[in-house]
Amino acid sequence: SQRNRSDMSHAIHADNCNLHESGECSRKPPAYTWRDFSAILYLNDNFEGGEFIFATDISARNVESTVKPRCGRLVGFSAGSENLHGVQGVQKGRRCAIGLWFTFNPIYEEIEYVLAKQVLQQVLKGGSVADQLVRELRKYVIFQEPSSSVINKPNSMIPNDSMNRQTVTNDKSKLQEIYVKKSANYQKSLTDIVIHRDSSEI
């Protein structure tokens, strides 16, 4: 409890410029000059005092409006000198709030937001992420028929190289060499070609 408190919990200020006694608000460091909009989200209201105020001067002699905190209430405003604001002293309890700031400056764009936007654009163009993953996998993985279906089949029915490639790209050259050797001998002898997933040749 601080019932005799006369100071402010947060002095009058602007969110993107340095407020001086003269009333001038210079938009340069150390101010957060990239802020364009601000918001305060209240998480509780079981306290006394701590009202959010808009004022016209640094001393808060002229209070334009007062916002009483309420759990879940959000106050939003542009961040410049047109919205000088502060917080009156909390008389009792604890005031909990989340401060939020927004910018149009692309330099400060969050990478998570950029990536999320790219994913959404890809989904709109090419279907769901799952569909796109399946299409990508099919470029590198060819699903072979069970080996029993290859045994004792005529030459014309034996899957060719493009149908028998398995797993990842770096195995393609090995598979091709195997098939070249096998097919060269096939004309002389009708050797059955059986390739297993756990084959040591792959």
Image (cartoon, rainbow, N blue to C red):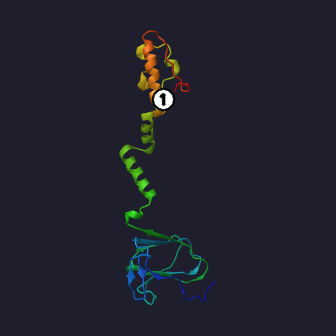
Q: Nearer the viewer, residue 155 or 9?
A: 155
With 53 as the anchor, is 5 left or right in this view?
right
Q: Could you say where residue 87 lies in the image, as x and y percent from the top left?
A: 51, 81
Could you say whether the residue bearing mark 1 is in a helix, strand or loop? Answer: loop
Q: Residues within 10 Å of mark 1 (few under 14, many from 20)?
A: many
The residue depicted at 45 percent of the width and 72 percent of the height is: 39
Q: How many marks?
A: 1
Q: Could you say where residue 82 lies in the image, as x and y percent from the top left?
A: 37, 80
Q: Nearer the viewer, residue 141 or 90?
A: 141
Residue located beneath label 1 in the image: 166
Q: Is residue 43 visible?
A: yes
The residue depicted at 40 percent of the width and 52 percent of the height is: 118
The residue depicted at 55 percent of the width and 84 percent of the height is: 89
Q: Looking at the image, is 147 positioned above or below residue 31?
A: above
Q: Could you say where residue 186 lies in the image, as x and y percent from the top left?
A: 44, 13
Disc 1 marks a residue whose amino acid type is Gln
Q: Nearer the viewer, residue 64 or 182?
A: 182
Which quadrant does the N terminus fall into? bottom right
Q: Looking at the image, is 24 positioned above or below residue 102?
A: below
Q: Looking at the image, is 82 positioned above or below residue 199?
A: below
With 1 as the anchor, is 128 left or right in this view?
left
